[in-house]
Amino acid sequence: MTTTAWPTELPPAGRADLVRRTPAPGLTSPRAWAELVYAVVDLVPAIAFFTLLVTLLSVGLGLVVIYAGVPILVLALLVARFGGLVQRSLAAALLELPTEGPPWTAPRRPGPIAAIGAVVRDPAHWRAVAYFCVKIGLAPLTFTVAVAFYSAGLGALTYPAWRLWLPAEVAADGTVHHGTQLWPGFFLDTWPAMIAYALLGLGVLWCAPRVVGFLTTVDRILVVTLLGRRG
């Protein structure tokens, strides 16, 4: 797989614009299959980190009035920071989008209280929380669209090869058919119908990497703007 040099020194707007101008991949492109793997694999950390963050933030913010929630809140922000590292690593490995992590906010003075304050004040942690709040909707959408387009397209394209293993169906006129019934009385068991169905599957497969590429481009922009280094 060829690599692309993503200049991390660009300002956020410039980097996001560069991401949006990435050329669309074709079905034979290694990048298209890498984006498919990303769409499938990325669902697990997106759900895991969002669930963990919502739990910790809910408990931490609920108990912060008695100070018992402060350590939990700090833990939640550190988990968000770690989740951002995981997402940047996935984007670098599968989307060819290496990004530099944001710097840590230094404590204003020595001591644990100042260290806790630095974590809470650090905007990078809160941007990571915002990323996973958006990601919990984007990741399932990308996963569903990717699986639906590729499986439907591949299934339709190879339909003539596996049609004979379908159970026989009896039409209303008493004829027996080995094929999918699209509507009453119409079966996909003639060569013109099967060829048309296969061509439809080929068209869906042609669209699949472009649709998935659009959704992963949205994720690229989120990774750069919310998880990457600013300035």
Image (tube, helix red, strand yellow):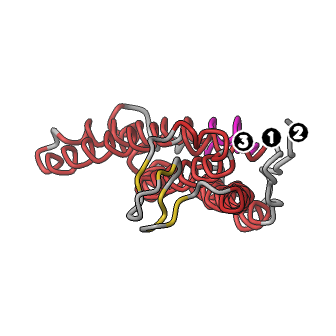
Label at residue 33: 3
The x and y percentages for residue 132 are 44, 51
Label 1 crowd (10 A; few <14 / some 14-19 / many >=20): few
Circles 2 and 1: CB distance less than 8 Å? yes
Q: Nearer the viewer, residue 193 or 215?
A: 193
Quadrant of residue 134 in the image?
bottom left
For disc 2, the marked residue is 2
Up/down of 98 relative to 184, above or below: above
The x and y percentages for residue 120 are 38, 48
Residue at image location 38% in from the left, 38% down from the top: 48
The x and y percentages for residue 179 are 53, 50
Residue at image location 49% in from the left, 63% down from the top: 182
Q: Answer left or right for 147 relative to 175.
A: right
The x and y percentages for residue 51 are 31, 43
Residue type, mark 2 in image? Thr
For disc 1, the marked residue is 30
The C terminus is located in which quarter? bottom right
Q: Answer left or right for 75 relative to 223.
A: left
Question: Which SS class for mark 3?
Answer: helix
Label 2 crowd (10 A; few <14 / some 14-19 / many >=20): few
Circles 3 and 1: CB distance less than 8 Å? yes
Q: Which residues are magenta?
A: 89-102
Residue at image location 45% in from the left, 37% down from the top: 44
Callout in the foreground (2, 1): 1
Residue type, mark 3 in image? Trp
